[in-house]
Amino acid sequence: MADQHEVDLDSIIDRLLEVRGSRPGKQVQLLETEIRYLCTKAREIFISQPILLELEAPIKICGDIHGQYYDLLRLFEYGGFPPEANYLFLGDYVDRGKQSLETICLLLAYKIKYPENFFILRGNHECASINRIYGFYDECKRRYNIKLWKTFTDCFNCLPIAAIIDEKIFTMHGGLSPDLNSMEQIRRVMRPTDVCPSSLSPSLSPSLSPSLSLSLSPPLSLLTHRDLDPRLRAPV
């Protein structure tokens, strides 16, 4: 693996953005060493920041991307490319879409470039047992190798899981157990941690009982951002 000092982060971002204006589907094939750098460096930043983020407005909050890389680029064109605006993404960056790698790599690159202005939370698809089935594993295997998928898994296991904005707006990917009584219970979750996706209340930590676990899976009764804004429709 190349030394991290040899990796040019700005070059990675520039190449990921070069396909703007291209026909959707055009790939950006980064070097494997560059992707490993993104995962390793971003993981360090995630661990250095709280699992329950405390953020300030103004900040743009974005829902599922699911490998729709050109939708992500259009989103930035609409809202402003970092650092023009602060962003919080709520999870589900991979699976289903055809370009999960470009999607997560750009998000990780921006997180490294702007660690105090760009934030991404964990969704239920940032979990090995989910993205092993729904496309991300196969994309990593086809374009690179299985070891790289495992590197992403190590990174995902350190993502924050929730954020509070201006001390009054609580955000996360799915929802909360009704038995969760305080924010301190979230703060006590230790990372790295895997997520059990077998129910709508997956356990995030052995130290938490199942009744106190958070849910990364969105309840079916909730509307998504795509239900509210037809301009952002994409496979879910």
Image (spheres, helix red, strand yellow):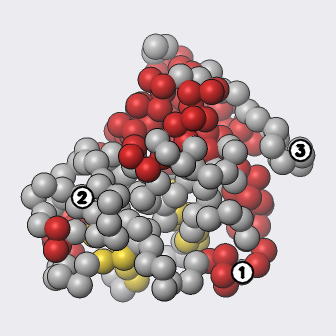
Instruction: Answer with mark 1 or mark 3, whichever residue precedes in sequence.
Output: 3
Q: Nearer the viewer, residue 38 or 233?
A: 233
Neighbours of disc 3 within 10 Å: few (<14), some (14-19), many (20+): few
Residue underneath mark 2: 204
- Residue 204 appears in which quarter of the rendering? bottom left
Give amino acid for label 1: Asp
Which residue occupies 19% across, 79% down? 180
Label 3 secondary element: loop
**Which numbered dot is residue 70?**
none
Neighbours of disc 1 within 10 Å: few (<14), some (14-19), many (20+): few
Does residue 67 sit above or below 165 in this rendering? above
The span from disc 1 to disc 3 (Cα, nearest Å) is 24 Å
**Which numbered dot is residue 22?**
3
Instruction: Answer with mark 1 or mark 2, whichever residue precedes in sequence.
Output: 2
Which residue occupies 69% across, 45% down? 98
Q: Nearer the viewer, residue 128 or 72?
A: 128
**Which numbered dot is residue 229?**
1
Label 1 secondary element: loop
Q: Is residue 162 visible?
A: no
Image location (x, y in percent) of residue 44: 34, 39
